[in-house]
Image: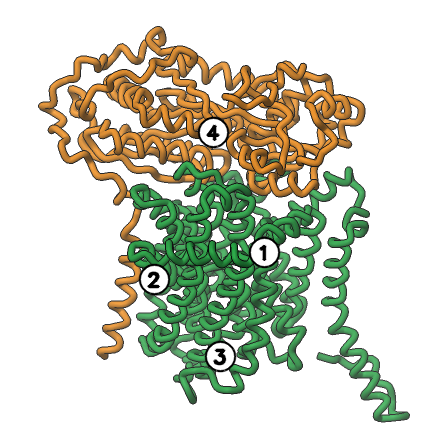
Chain colours: A green, B orange
Amino acid sequence: MDALTQLLANLGAGFGTALTPINLMFGLIGVVVGTAIGVLPGIGPALTISLLLPLTFGLDPTTAFILFGGIYYGAMYGGSTTSILVNTPGESASVVTTLDGFRMAKQGRGGAALATAAIGSFIAGTFATFMLMLLAPALVEFALKFGPPEYFAIMFLALTAVTGLAGESAPKAMFATLLGLGIGMVGIDLQTGQARFTFGRPELLSGIDIVTAAIGLFAIGEVLWMAGTFKRALEETIKTTGSLWMTREEWKRSLPSWARGSVLGFIIGVLPGAGATVATFLSYNLERRMSKNPEKFGTGMIEGVAGPEAANNASAGGAMVPLLALGIPGSGTTAMMLAAFQLYGLRPGPLLFAQRPDLVWGLIASLYIGNALLLLLNLPLVGVWVKMLDVPKPLLFGSILAFSVLGVYSNEGSLIGLLVLLGLGLLAFFMRRHGFPMAPIVLGVVLGPLIEQEFRRAMLISIGNPAIFFTRPLSLTILIFAILSLLIPFAEILWKRYRARKGQAAAVPTFGDEVD
Amino acid sequence: MFRRIVLILALVTIVAVACAPAPTATPVPPTAAPKPTDAPKPTTAPTVAAVKPTDAPKPTDAPKPTVAPSGPLAATKAGFPNKAMTILAPANPGGGWDQTSRLMQQVFVSEKLLPVSIEVVNKGGAAGTIGLAEFAAKKDPYTMMTMGLVMVGGILTNKSAITLKDTVPLARLTGEYEVIAVPANSKYKTLQDLIADFKKDPKSITWGGGSAGGTDHILIGLIAQAVGVDIKNVNYVAFAGGGESAAAIIGGQLTAGVSGYGEWKAQVDAGKMRFLAVSSEKKIGKDPTPTLIESGVNVSLANWRGIVGSPGIDADTRAWQIEALKRMHDSKAWQDIVVKNEWDDLFLTGDAYGKFLEEEDKRITAVLKAIGLIQ
């Protein structure tokens, strides 16, 4: 009981801090700027915070962190908009959203997709903040149990999600995944310091940025695709059909997805080595597995938007746990916030809660407020964003091209980065022309370096004994999940065949038949 | 039509909001800045003298912050500078070079040391060699670049065509020391215990630290050499940064870890980690952690950071930049920063600094060869 009163007192003081006019104003600026940069391709929250840092030197640290927290959450809200409406994710964490979100928009349900993303984000963000407040120290203990073998197992699980992204052809999806893994390998290898696939270009030494890859493959690819097919106008986007908002049925289908996405995203977010993109892929996979109609994913299933969008927001909240409780960043944005702490002369770490309760609790309270502001900001914006589809295509895609190039240049600051962007766009165009899915490439780029490094770390720790993956309970459990996730679809097919045959009694067996 | 216009306006606003706080917007030149040309030369500004190695203060007797000459530094005869200056941080935001650059900027601005504004630009990647290549190619006298030990190693391991010889040494600023740490519940209480097991069965000890060939790895290489363990048997696990490796160490995934002192101090204060040794020559502040040398391992390593000037700058410009750096160094604001971050003041300027760079290059080459990262 004492703990609870203490918590409430802290939270009360936190709201006291967060609700002062100046802090409230900066919180509002944060969520607005965050939403804007989320919508714009290439410019992410980490870059924005680094650009804003010098401007905040004069501010009280608490105010500055309220601003940064708002930007972080806001960017996660905004990221879905362009994914859904024009198939061009602005961040790697919203790539998955394109799969069903864009289809929904094509079917005239863009408004519902945007709404489910916004409401899901609100629920997930609030849930994550609540857990952060309640359980941060305990969660940190949990997160620390994850060593390289466990991370490897999680990445492996995420990699099995590729079966859900396959589209029409499994071999093509495999090829796309391997291509992504290859792209992810470009640069200096962490364990040996040797350069790989850099063709002697120093600019490639630091690898291909995941943001550049996502924008090149999706945004530039989409622009080229539109340019290539515009005259033929293959698919006319349907203007909003029915209500702009979600129907009762869409609500019903979104609710469990939001809940699952929130929990899953938060757990992945707490782990310092995983990240929001991994969370979204895992969530998409989970939604597909839980669905009664997994084959319909990729054709505009609202669960495929609700789950991942909740997951990426929850992971942003989760990433605050190791940052505040341990001083260990779990994402690019929290790494930037850690740097900001240091510039303010604050020692982030386990003692921050004790030494600067005003800052920590003010930040937590402001995250609640920020989430509410974001919902208020984003729901009315749904109506505005949907109008984006009324913009003539040449104008719309022309500006997407311009924003993508600007965003990537501001992120990388080099011409080579732009060449890589255009190269990947061309690649995406030709691959789409021949029916290759794009999402597995991004999955490969994101997971490739992680899965490889964690595997090698684990093997170094075990001095070359692969048993390390199967003798640690956590790692073993996750690997079993991964294998089940691969096998269940086959088991289902076999079961259906068995049932079908049993129904036909003595009918001729149909073993050689293709089943899809 | 109206809706279309509204939408375009909305997009433009978004871009304006997102792009406005670009780094250029940061520093405001001091309002009372005298025109560079007619400013009286502060008597304490020896324009050329600072370059002479003899005048470079040794790190130990760095001048106490005296009464700083008031007002910004006057321009050179040739009129340098007459526009905004840049500090290039050859790293992404958040690392040591970024932090050093931004703190320098902070002092330059808050103490009104320059007649012009100064901004920080990041150009990260490949241990700073990508930033270095751009810096050397640009030949812009208005840009200075932060660098340090990591870059010396990075140039060697990445076989960079551009080296520090393509830049002009201005000043060494600070040093940060490395620590050897174990989880708080580790059985190792002293470095001697750890080294004893390390000698017995080198592979059984897993060391965690930053990327291969970086400062952390170099320190482990030096230690292995010093205690007579074949470097090829060292089980070094590389992580992307001090945060990731800290999580692995606190979580008990590794035997021991190496990182910057300041990076992990908070973990020790919170009782999550134990420091076994520091890589400095003397104990750090009031911290009782013994040095490596006191623990019987004859190794010391400073992760020093400094700043270099653009290739081809003339002697006057160089002297001006060194004088500006000297005034920054002498300011109380900078001294406070050094103390607060538990850095060591390793201020050394001009040609003496250049000589130091050459020696450091030789030392690091030898270690990296021994580790097998370069031929």
- Asked whether the residues under the numbered discs 4 and 3 touch, taking CB atoms below 8 Å apart as contact, a structural biologist would say no
Q: Is residue A401 visible?
A: no
As drawn, the label of residue A32 is 2
Pointer 3 or 2: first along the chain: 2
Q: Amino acid at mark 4?
A: Ala
Quick check: A323 left or right of B352?
right
Q: Is residue A111 above or below residue B36?
A: below
What SS does tag 2 mark?
A: helix
Quick check: A163 left or right of A60?
right
Q: Chain of mark 2?
A: A
Quick check: B261 left or right of A374?
right
Residue A438 quadrant = bottom right
What SS does tag 4 mark?
A: loop
Q: Residue furthest left?
A: B38
In the rendered image, residue B337, in percent from the top left (x then y), is placed at 38, 28
Of badges 3 and 2, the one in the foreground is 2
Residue that mark 4 sits on? B161
As drawn, the label of residue A135 is 1
- Asked whether the residues under the numbered discs 1 and 4 touch, taking CB atoms below 8 Å apart as contact, a structural biologist would say no
What SS does tag 3 mark?
A: helix
As drawn, the label of residue A39 is none
Q: Label 2 vs label 1: CA separation? A: 29 Å
Pointer 3 or 1: first along the chain: 3
Q: Chain of mark 3?
A: A
Of badges 3 and 1, the one in the foreground is 1
Q: Chain of mark 1?
A: A
